[in-house]
Image: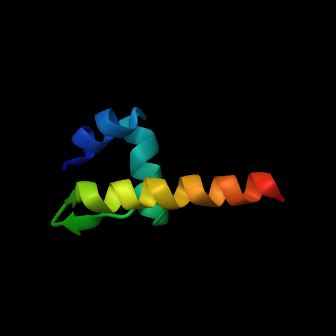
Amino acid sequence: MTISDLAVYLQVSQSSLYKLVQRGTVPGHKVGRHWRFHKVSIDGWLQDRSASAARSAKK
């Protein structure tokens, strides 16, 4: 996926997504000047975040 594809998939702006990937928050790889993302990695990252949020809510 490209950054524009991922922005649509996550329903966030591209500028917000650029900030997240530069911080290392979102799993991705830079190929030359462009960011690329694997859907499986993004889905796993989303599941991990959901699980972490659920654990934090229980405390």
Q: Position of residue 57 (x, y in %)?
A: 77, 51
Q: Nearer the viewer, residue 53 or 26?
A: 53
Q: Quick check: 14 above or below 56? A: above
| Colour scheme | rainbow
Q: Is residue 28 left or right of residue 48?
A: left
Total numbered labels placed on residues in the image: 0
Q: Quadrant of residue 45?
A: bottom left
Q: Residue at x 39, y 61 (%)?
A: 44
Quadrant of the rendering where the C terminus is positioned: bottom right
Q: Quadrant of residue 38?
A: bottom left
Q: Residue at x 16, y 66 (%)?
A: 31
Q: Quick check: 39 above or below 30? A: above
Q: Is residue 37 visible?
A: no
Q: Position of residue 20 (x, y in %)?
A: 47, 54
The residue most toward the left is 32
The residue most toward the front is 58
Q: Nearer the viewer, residue 16 or 47?
A: 47
The residue most toward the right is 59
Q: Quick check: 29 above or below 57? A: below
Q: Is residue 10 left or right of residue 54?
A: left
Q: Position of residue 53 (x, y in %)?
A: 66, 53
Q: Position of residue 29 (x, y in %)?
A: 26, 67
Q: Is residue 22 visible?
A: yes
Q: Quadrant of residue 40?
A: bottom left
Q: Residue at x 36, y 54 (%)?
A: 43
Q: Nearer the viewer, residue 53 or 29?
A: 53
